[in-house]
Image (cartoon, coloured by chain):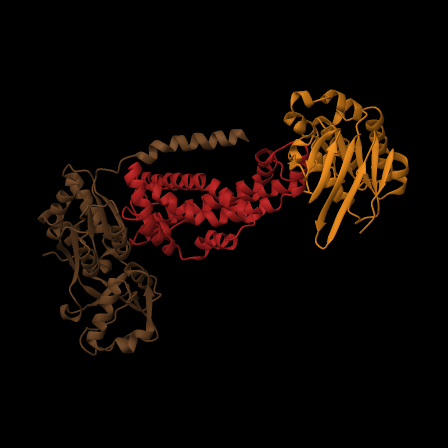
Chain colours: A brown, B red, C orange
Amino acid sequence: MSRLFRCLFAFMVLLAPALAQAAPRAPVVLAAASLQEAMNDAADAFARTGHPRPVVSFAGSSALARQVEAGAPADLFVSADEDWMNALAAKGLIRADTRADLLYNTLVLIEPAGQHTRLSIEKGFPLSRALGGGRLALADPAGVPAGKYAEAALTWAGVWGAVKDRIAIGENVRAALALVERGQARMGIVYATDALASNKVRVIARFPRASHPLIAYPVAQIARSDNPEARAFLAFLTSPRGKAVFRRHGFGTR
Amino acid sequence: MLRPEDWGVVFLSLKVSLLAVGCVLPFAFLCAWLLARGRFPGRVLLDALVHLPLVLPPVVVGWVLLILFGTNGPIGGLLERTFGLTVMFRWTGAAIAAAVMALPLMVRAIRLSLEAIDPRYEQAARSLGADGPRRFLTVVLPLSLPGVLTGAILGFARSLGEFGATITFVSNIPGETQTLPIAIYSALQVPGEEGRVWTLAAVSVALSLAALLVSEGLARRGTKDGHVL
Amino acid sequence: MSFDVDVSVRLGAQVLGAAFATGEGLTLLFGPSGAGKTTILNMVAGLVGPDAGHVRVGGETLFDSAAGIDVPAHRRRLGFVFQDARLFPHMKVRANLLYGWKLARSEDRWIALEEVTRFLGIESLLDRAPRTLSGGEAQRVAIGRALLSGARALLMDEPLAALDPERSEEIMRVIERVRDELKLPILYVTHDREEAARLATDRIEVRPL
């Protein structure tokens, strides 16, 4: 019995130094889940210039913003939409002078590879008929940016009412992509970058620029960050070398 | 088959789960004890509170932890000011999330084993000269040991699988808070990463199965020997 | 004088009471089931608290409501032998026997493990687990465990009730020897007439209220 206690005690004592460790010096970047491949490539490219490789945490923009609100020890925040960045700015949690629109994206209508639907997107286009009996995969329009943009675009085209009962909601845009990849949904609306990343889907058409609000990924340094590497990485992201990485993944840059 | 970074994920998961179970075990025992033996006002409330993580959506638990343990939160702020300890975005924070989610399962297992102890053994110990603490150490604790071990292993398995509360509370930081389920989630986000998903999922299944089998074995041994370990 | 007891306790709407003083040997609390014999024994042991009265054993006051004395059960040095032997299932026979012995102050220990095992004929059982013992063996170990705890008297609550006639006879002989050779005062609860006739030095009738 007392042996058990001694083991437990030793365990606690051994853990104590681990608990007291300092945070890593590489900048901690909170990035929207849809940036996973591109941001990892950018972090690798930054590391090749002699800097420590940034530590990147990918999750939903909303979850990441909540973590910043709670005082997360992070350095940079890259949001998938302006709303969350605005919310943090209003609370003084980001450094306003470091905020920039890092990337732009566009929306595309996709179908599983091997299909050959011909459809051009304009006001009143026959989306409902093209779906047949199938479903249209979207990220959740209630809260996920990609879903919100898709709803806005379909409303602009005047077809939202006709298809809104036939959508298949993904928890995020990559889940919507997977629904189309597996043929669970007849078509889907995702970012151009998602379509480019997958060889199991085919782009039917691109949504016109005017059909939805500007899809921008704002970046900013978090107010409590004092890591000089964070500034360096931010500068790299907006440099020609950084932009080239993102363009390779299908993003637009200024 | 496993890449070096995958091994890192596996070891991190084990480390997080071990810390979670090790630290929450005494607390779980105390709760189980109070629920099994205690007769006090608020007992029903404690029961409900302990079971809350079992029935709440894990994201809600993560969000509450974020508010409490965040650097701006009441507990997180206190830890940071007094001990210079940050749990947010640290593996210790992941352990806190796992511990909270594992607590109800552990309390249930320990409580069952405490309730199964015949109080007449304690009466016998009392007549032989054992005071309260000694009765606890020599009779109650050893007789509840199978339940404690089962609870610890169930809690460990639950910790290994913890996702929602963890990603909400401490994010998805490779090498720090990216545990097995979160690594699987991340790999699922990337087209063409199905191979990694399969590998990590297989490791998950193997670890959880092993834990549950050990727990099952202990439970059976416990009944066979009349709680002898 | 061995036991000097005068206690009462309220149990729901009823009041249970007993008053008696005993001499040497084995004193029987005799009466039908449900008369409250076990409760009286528990009050002597300190497992149930009387509302009023006193309990003295061998001249020492263990409970006195008027004087505000209430020695806790674990310090009364009264060996309790239950109907079911209640050996600790997670300990071997040896550890069961030594459980109370280790807790007793050295000046209170009056018998050694070797003596007890020889006296009770349980030398060969020391390394066995309780669940492997027969009912008679278990009860002998339970008596040994009570003796080794430094008990100044024994309280026995129907120790033969769970045994078949043969085992019963075996344990009855052990109890007689404890009474006659070890000269330990015993307070003994039973509802069995034959047992009562054979063991009792003294006998107190307990009637249902």
Q: Locate residue A188: give its quadrant.
A: bottom left
Q: In which quarter of the image is the N terminus of chain B?
A: top left
Q: Nearer the viewer, residue C19 or C109?
A: C19
Which residue is rendered at x = 16% and y = 51% of the image? Answer: A220
- Count numbered badges in the picture: 0
Residue drawn 54% across and 44% down?
A: B33
Q: A203 and A78: which one is in front?
A: A78
Depth check, front residue: A169 or A124 = A169
In-image side of A42 versus B31 (left or right): left
Q: Is residue B118 above or below residue C105?
A: below
Out of A253 and C175, give the one closest to the viewer: C175
Quarter of the figure with residue B222 = top right
Residue C197, percent across and down?
Answer: 90, 38
Farthest front residue? C66
Q: Position of residue A125 (x, y in %)?
A: 21, 77
Residue B117 appears in view: yes
Q: Is residue C92 above or below residue A220?
A: above
Task: Classify A236 as above or below A119.
Answer: above
Left/right of residue A83 with respect to residue A178 in the rendered view: left
Whether residue B88 is visible to the viewer of this picture, yes or no, is: no
Q: In which quarter of the image is the C terminus of chain B?
A: top right
